Amino acid sequence: MAKFSFLVGFGAGYVLGARAGRERYEQILRMWSDAKDNPQLQGLAGMAQARADDAVSSVKSKMGRDTTPESSTSARSTGTTTTPPATATSSPDVTALPVDPPPIA
């Protein structure tokens, strides 16, 4: 059933995208590029990432998990890596922003 739903959604997106045409696609691509390169948006994305990192760190500490690698030597590996928390003087990480335009609904 999930495969059928996916195929119906894909087909609907394809038909709607084809009707919009190449000109509309290029317009959406330009708008996405302009928004992606906007310094205000990059700053907001950096602040959102920092808040999300802080929230994850807070939840981990409340659950009794320490995020430092030294204390996790006896714990089993989950295959994920942790990054050090952002400092107040660091600039936002803009490399984590998506490069591709959002999908056309």
Image (cartoon, rainbow, N blue to C red):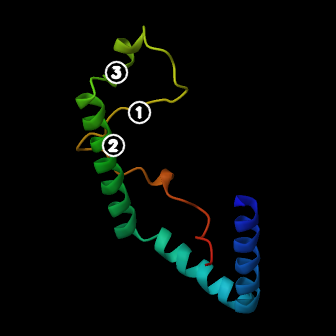
Camera-side residue of 102 and 97: 102
**Pointer 2 or 3: first along the chain:** 2
**C-alpha span from label 1 to label 2:** 9 Å
Q: Secondary structure at mark 3?
A: loop
Camera-side residue of 58 and 22: 58
On residue 83, the disc is: 1
104 relative to 85, above or below? below
Image x and y of residue 72, in percent: 39, 14
Q: Which residue is mark 2?
A: 53
Q: Farthest residue toward the top?
A: 74
Q: Amino acid at mark 2?
A: Asp
Identify which residue is drawn at 72% across, 80% down: 12
Q: Image check: 90 left or right of 101?
A: left
Image x and y of residue 68, in percent: 34, 21
Identify which residue is drawn at 23% across, 30% down: 62
Q: Secondary structure at mark 2?
A: helix
**C-alpha span from label 2 to label 3:** 14 Å
Question: In which quarter of the view is residue 40 placed?
Answer: bottom left
Identify which residue is drawn at 43% across, 30% down: 82
**Pointer 1 or 2: first along the chain:** 2
Eye-nearest disc, 1 or 2: 2
Question: In which quarter of the view is residue 13 placed?
Answer: bottom right
Quadrant location of the C terminus in the rendered image: bottom right
Q: Image check: 105 left or right of 37?
A: right
Q: Are marks 1 and 2 in contact (CB under 8 Å)?
A: yes
Q: Amino acid at mark 1?
A: Thr
Quadrant location of the N terminus in the rendered image: bottom right
Q: Which residue is mark 3?
A: 68
